[in-house]
């Protein structure tokens, strides 16, 4: 009965999950190297702690110091997990449930302390050292329970080594205290097990060295008595400070150093065309490094390191200007009143400011600039261009503009080019909406398809009557282009907001 419930819960949890991400061999090598080094150091330095705990266990109750339970490991191979024994020695056939609940009489007084502090898990460092486990990974499940899991779920979870700690073990570090009463097993199967499996899936999908470092740091933090009872945010486990540092801050800092170095070099060359200045290469490199450091610090204060620049609003151009302006003002004041030798002219600072600003905006909005150039090239080349699929949008209203915006922000934006709109509103003729021009009325669709070698026509009209829509669709069907009808998202949003309008009693409908 238990196994049937577990199987049902796992299937419902994993039905909508994505395909498991393949494990990178280089990443796996570094992860294993990290495990060997730190498990060895842990075993070496914690040997006196092991001895003290072992003596305390033997003194309190008879039986072995270590508990060795059968678990399922990487590639579905069984192994024996090592823990300090926390229960009284059981007689044959009297093992009880595999899940322990709050107030379980089988747990010794020393066992309660070991479980609360998680010290009972320390012997698993040996499992890590010999390769059965990793420092970070999905917690190893009882072998018999794991056999009941669906094959696709087992293939994903056991594609990596189980770990001493994991996001699930951090979130549910007080699992025993959550399980109370006679129906604790039902509560575990209904609520806790599916969520632990969801967290394991997320861990595997976000697997990286820096994620492991964040999880190890979070594990040490939650063991502190002041924090042990507080909830841990999942965003810290899958996108914590280490991952943020090396994925968002460090790469942009290195890019900004390159941009600043090129900007200082170009400004110096331009300056020397009209005036003599010889500051030397070390001064220029130091200045470029200082610019990158100050810009990175100000960007962090402004929150720009959290911006996804691929989808960023043009409004952030102003924020970049503020960051560059404050940086150059501070450096100029330092040079003017503190480090006066060598003295750098204000006009040279101004030139460096302009070139640095242009460079920083360029690298952050590079994909959008490339897309814009691609669109312009498509229009210039007409039917001779062949590097991208050309799109014609029928309708230059809100839905058409939204369609253009979605295409430009998509993963395949460089493979598609929106050549233009067609719309029967004479006021919009030859106007540019966003970056795209209204090329003509709907009757000109066949001519435009032939002229620009249009491959896709997106029908994005929301406010026309059915007769007009059918007429325009028949024009589109007369061409060789593929027709895509855009769902009327604007209308659906309006209908949704209509339901939130207050009625006569001041209440939402």
Image (cartoon, rainbow, N blue to C red):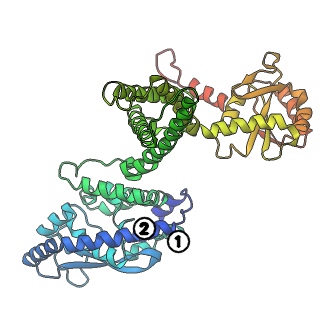
Identify the disc placed on residue 30.
2
Pick whichever of labels 1 and 2 is earlier in the sequence: 2
SS at badge 1? helix
Q: Position of residue 376 (x, y in %)?
A: 76, 34
Identify the disc placed on residue 151.
1
Q: Residues within 10 Å of mark 2 (few under 14, many from 20)?
A: few
Q: Residues within 10 Å of mark 1 (few under 14, many from 20)?
A: few
Q: Which of the two residues, 319 or 311, is positioned nearer the viewer here?
A: 319
Quarter of the rendering occupied by the N terminus = bottom left
Task: Tell me if label 1 and label 2 are in contact, CB under 8 Å.
Answer: no
Q: Residue at x 21, y 78 (%)?
A: 66
Q: Position of residue 486 (x, y in %)?
A: 73, 37
> Toward which corner of the image does residue 124 lie, by quadrant?
bottom left
> Toward which corner of the image does residue 211 lie, by quadrant?
bottom left
Residue 239 visible within the image: no
Q: Is residue 381 above or below residue 336?
A: below
Q: Residue at x 30, y 28 (%)?
A: 338
Q: Is residue 9 above or below residue 422?
A: below
Q: Position of residue 345 (x, y in %)?
A: 44, 25
């Amino acid at each position: 009965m238990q196994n049937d419930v577990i199987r049902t819960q796992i299937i419902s949890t994993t039905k909508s999950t994505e395909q498991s991400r393949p494990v990178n061999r280089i990443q796996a090598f570094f992860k294993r190297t990290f495990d060997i080094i730190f498990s060895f150091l842990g075993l070496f330095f914690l040997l006196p702690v092991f001895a003290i705990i072992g003596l305390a266990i033997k003194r309190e109750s008879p039986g072995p110091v270590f508990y060795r339970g059968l678990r399922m490991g990487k590639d579905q191979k069984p192994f024996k997990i090592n823990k300090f024994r926390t229960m009284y020695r059981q007689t044959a056939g009297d093992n009880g449930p595999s899940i322990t609940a709050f107030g379980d009489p089988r747990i010794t007084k020393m066992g309660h302390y070991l479980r609360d502090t998680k010290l009972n898990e320390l012997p698993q460092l040996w499992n890590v050292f010999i390769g059965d486990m990793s420092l970070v990974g999905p917690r190893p499940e009882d072998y018999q329970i794991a056999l009941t899991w669906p094959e696709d779920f087992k293939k994903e979870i056991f594609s990596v080594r189980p770990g001493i700690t994991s996001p699930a073990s951090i979130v549910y570090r007080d699992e025993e205290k959550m399980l109370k009463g006679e129906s604790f097993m039902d509560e575990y199967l209904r609520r806790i097990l599916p969520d632990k499996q969801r967290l394991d899936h997320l861990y595997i999908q976000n697997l990286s060295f820096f994620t492991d470092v964040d999880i190890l740091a979070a594990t040490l933090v939650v063991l502190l008595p002041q924090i042990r009872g507080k909830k841990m945010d999942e965003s810290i486990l899958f996108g914590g400070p280490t991952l943020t540092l090396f994925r968002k801050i460090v790469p942009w800092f290195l890019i900004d150093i390159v941009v600043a170095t090129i900007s200082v070099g170009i400004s110096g060359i331009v300056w020397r065309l009209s005036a003599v200045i010889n500051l030397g290469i070390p001064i220029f490199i130091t200045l470029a490094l200082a610019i990158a450091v100050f810009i990175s610090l100000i960007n962090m204060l402004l929150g720009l390191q959290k911006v996804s620049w691929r989808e960023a609003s043009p409004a952030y151009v102003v924020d970049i200007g503020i960051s560059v302006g404050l940086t150059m003002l501070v450096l100029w004041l330092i040079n003017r009143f503190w480090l006066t030798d060598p003295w750098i002219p204000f006009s040279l600072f101004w030139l460096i400011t302009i070139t640095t600003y242009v460079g920083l905006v360029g690298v952050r909005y590079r994909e959008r600039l490339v897309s814009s150039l691609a669109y312009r090239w498509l229009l210039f080349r007409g039917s001779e261009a062949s590097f991208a699929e050309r799109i014609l949008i029928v309708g230059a209203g809100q839905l058409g503009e939204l369609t253009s915006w979605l295409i430009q922000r998509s993963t395949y934006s460089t493979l598609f080019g929106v050549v233009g709109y067609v719309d029967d509103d004479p006021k919009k003729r030859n106007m540019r909406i966003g970056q795209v021009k209204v090329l003509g009325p709907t009757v000109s669709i066949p001519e435009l398809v032939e002229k620009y070698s249009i491959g896709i026509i997106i029908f994005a009209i929301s406010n026309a009557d059915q007769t007009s829509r059918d007429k325009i669709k028949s024009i589109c069907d007369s061409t060789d282009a593929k027709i895509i009808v855009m769902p009327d998202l604007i209308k659906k949003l309006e209908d949704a907001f209509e339901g939130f309008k207050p009625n006569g009693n001041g209440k939402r409908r």
